[in-house]
Every structure is written in C-alpha cells, then in structure tokens.
Amino acid sequence: MGKYLMKRLISVGLTLLFCFSLMLATERRAMAYVDPGSGLLALQSLGSMLAAAAFFMRRRIMGLFSKRKPLTGAEPRLVETRITGRKEDSRNTA
Amino acid sequence: MINGSPTPTFRDPAGSLSLEGDFAVRTIHPEARAQVFEFVASPFCKLLQDRGDMVGTTINDAPAGLKLIHPKIPVPTYPWEWTPSQWLAGAQLTLSLCAEALDQGWVLKDATPLNILFVGPRPVLVDVLSFERWDPAPKNYPSHIWLAYGQYIRTFLLPLLMNRLLSWPLELSMFKRDGYEPADLYKALSWPQRLSRSAFWPVTLAARFDAKDGDKVAVKAAPQHKSPELALHLLKRTLADLGKRTERAMPEYAGSEWSNYTATLTHYSAQESAQKMDWVRGVLDELKPARVLDIGANTGVFSALSAEQGAKVVALERDASAAESLYRMTRNSKLSIQTIHSDLSRPTPAVGWENRETSSLLHRLEGQFDLVLMLAVIHHLILMEQIPICAILELAHKLTAQYLVLEWVPATDPMYQSLMRGRDELYGSLSEADLLKACEGRFHTLRKQPLDNGRILFLFAKV
C-alpha cells in the first residue's frame, strides 16, 4: 500500500510541477484598462493552475484517500457521501 | 462652501460621468456605444437594478450620442469614510455581481471600492460601465484570467489586511487611488506576518513574483486558452477564493472607549436617558423630518430613533470602533441609516487630480438635512478640538436646512470636567448664555428641556 501511495504522490507532484512550469513559460502581460499588475497576474495564474490541476486530478486525489479505506468496510452514510461527492465532480465536467 | 462638485470622470475609455442637477449623467464614447447599449438593455442589467444592487439607469439614446441618466445619490461616501464591514460589504457585492455576470456572459472589467456607493446600509454598484462581454478567447491574455484580479487585491483586500495586521487606518486609502502594491507592504511586515495565512498569498508570494517579473522582458505570443467551461470554472474559483481571503483579512473587532459609550454611561441614569429619548422622540414626531444628520452618532441610538420615525439618516461618527458597531446595527436592522466614519472637526477633503475627483465631506453634507442632531457632542468640539462656539453654530447653520437639536453640556458636568483637563481659565466659565449668544442671527430657540443631570436639550430653528 505504501509503495502505491508513493507512486500516486509522485504522479500528482509531477503533474503540478508540469502545470506550474507551463504557466511560467506561457503567461504574458495582459492589456487592460486597469493595471493587472505583474506579480498579481502571476499569482492569479498560479491559483488558476492549481485549481485546474485539482479539477483534472480530482479522481486521483480522491483515490489517494479512498484506496486506504475500502468503501465496503465503511458505514453506509459515509459511502453515500462519497458517491454524492463523485456525482458533483462529474457535473463539473459537463 | 469650498470644494464644489467633482469634475467629470476621465479614466474609463468607455465613457465619463458628470453631476448635473439631481442626476448623474454618463456620456458614452462612440466606440463603446454598442456594447454599453447591449448591457443596459439586457434583462440582467434590469434585474440588478430591480434588486437594488446597481444604480437605476435611464437610457437616453439621442442622435448626439448615448447617455445614461442615474438618480444622484444624496450623500455619496468614499471608501476612506467606510468602516471595515462596509468595505467587506462592497467587496462581497463586487465579487458576487461578477460571478453572476459570468453566468450571463458578462464580466466586471474593474473592481475597486470607488465603484461602490452606499444607500443607507446597502452597497450599490454605481459604475454601469464596469460590465463588458466576457470573451472566452481574448487576444492578449488567457481566458481564465480575471483582469480586475490585481485591482481587487490592491484596492479591496490589501487595505483591509493592513488594517488588520498593522492597524493602518482605512482612511489612508484616500492617498492610494489604486491601492497598495504587495512589494511595498512586504517591506512593512515582520517575517511571522509575511508567512501568516492571510498575508502569504497576496503579499509575500505576489511580492516575490513582482521582483521576478520585473527582470523579465515580455515576449509576445498567443495566449493558451482553456475550454470556455473550464475557464468559467476557474474564474468562479478565483472569485470564491478572493471572497474567502477578504473575510480573513477583516480586522478583529475590538470595542474602543467610545463604542461602549452608551452601554457604560455613568453621567446618565436610566431615568435621565429615558427623559432625553422621550424628548427627542417628541421632536421627531412633531417635525417629521425627511432627512436627518446625526453628528457624533456613536453606536446609533438616536439615528435609529430618527429612522424608525421614517427619516433617512446620515450618521457621522469619528471613532472607528463605534462607527463599525453603528454600521453593523444598521445592516442588521435594515434601517435607512448611512454610516460615515469621519471627523467633523477634520472633515474629509476633496481629493484626486486637481482636488476635483471627489468632493469634500462638508460640500456633500451642506444644506441636505431638515434636522441636524448634535447630542452630547458640542463639549468634544469645544474642549478636545478647541473650536469656538460661534464657529460650531455657523457650521450647524450651513448643514441644516431647518432645525438643529443640540444638547448643551454645562461646565459642571463630569464629562466636561474630564475633557477640560485643568484648562478652567479658558473653558470653565462657558455657559448656556454663551451658546445662546452664538445663536444670534443664526438660530432662534423653539424648545428647551433641562435634564436632571444639568444638561439642556435645545430645539433651534434656522433664522
């Protein structure tokens, strides 16, 4: 289980690093009526990238936790909550 | 009175606003006409107006050009006259309107407290031109970027945060039209503060990015766009994140000497307090003023009394903590009371380019009120600010259109004695006669009510 978890963590970490590198490589100054700032623009990009990474990898992230505690052994109410949570996630992709 | 109406606005490329009589008139520049017309004619715009979240707008599509006519808000206030909770209310309105606009295909192109005015306790977005069509594939920046993000942080979040972390007064926003730069704040914070949950993201990290970006040369390249669905999702996450950060930046509320004033009155017994309240209520009942100015409103007991009698009240309070309590009371009670955190003895000046972008507080207040309340405030002006009685009555004469209710505090009063601080020779002999002498040519007495504690309530009418 420990080896599996480590592989997952490395996978998530690499994806985040990739997204961050992509952001630094591609972000450009915006043209706007208000000053978008430079650091604040990069900050927003970082926040968006983290949110996007979390969005794409939500199943993996959830998997990190669900694998450790099999659903079969969980209380019925907990199982129901998790299923509902997955439904909400799938709605976001629509 | 000095400092007249503000000059027409000039920054927004889509149009400018000027005050004409009882209206605010927005002239739309020809190149922005189509988009502005589309927005103001949209059901979404109408919904915001009906709900009271945005200022009322009448379209005047004349051959000379498109104009939008708004009703003039009687007493506009600026962010440097707001309490922290008013800042939060303005910020939350901005973020919620932007999130709602995204669902309708619009977005806010700017996000500054200067786009918000208060009507009673309620924030209202007055800059109709802030809305523009949301572009899912803009030419110059990625679609998941909210262009006003930086401005929101500089103008809403960071002033609140610095008020919380270092007690920088929110009044300082008067000197910073576009808010604080993270790099400047970074220098002012200690390391524990830089690493704190509330400051790490908007100050420390932003300042580091600033330093890094300053050395880079911008390279032109096509931006990377997300799918519209993902971009919208990310924009909404950004707005929700800003909302949480703004709540976390709110200063911890602490009672000050004056905010507990009415709860810890030692110079008023319950009976005397009731006596004063009954007398003021009687005056309000009889005169039925439509607009009341409560100077030194403290936590708003008499403002609430006036509003309950149907008046629209402007409550002026100089103590930050008392003003905050006052605003919270008005927000919870939904009474028509507009809180202004300002000091009558050092009123907000006109500021901005050529001192003409915003008008002075006294100019905004002058002649706007049927009744002015100066309850338990004159001794503060005389003793703490050292203003002559004649000057105080002269200002009251300018502020009220008809009546003045004034509470005279005699030199024997314990509060008067504590504020006099040994300056008996100068102030120890002031009496009711000096007050009435100062009224000559300005006010005549309609009613007088001595209270059991030696104070005297006067109802004056303007001559």
Image (tube, rainbow, N blue to C red):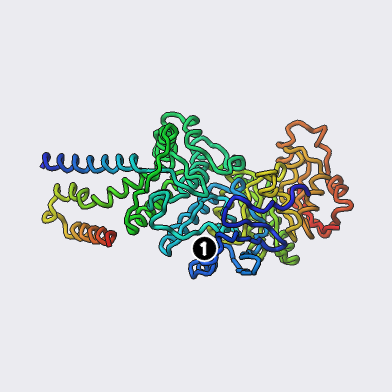
Residue drawn 47% across the image and 47% down it: A31
Query: Which quadrant of the figure has residue B447?
Result: bottom right
The x and y percentages for residue B275 are 70, 57
User: Which kind of residue does numbered mark 1 sit on?
Assistant: Gln
The x and y percentages for residue B278 are 70, 60
Q: Of residues B399 and B219, which is closer to you in this image?
A: B219
Residue topped by disc 1: B35
Q: Of residues B254 and A42, which is closer to you in this image?
A: A42
Q: How many marks?
A: 1
Q: State the quadrant of the C terminus of chain B.
A: bottom right
Residue drawn 81% across the image and 44% down it: B391
Q: Of residues B8 and A84, which is closer to you in this image?
A: B8
In the displayed structure, A78 sits above or below B418; it is below
Residue drawn 22% across the image and 58% down it: A86
The x and y percentages for residue B178 are 55, 43
The x and y percentages for residue B349 are 69, 44
Query: Which quadrant of the figure has residue B221?
Result: top left
For label 1, count other residues whose C-alpha is less than 10 Å away and answer few (under 14), some (14-19) or many (20+).
Answer: some
Query: In this rendering, does residue B121 appear at all?
Result: no
Chain identifier of the residue bearing label 1 in the image:
B
Residue A45 appears left or right of B261:
left
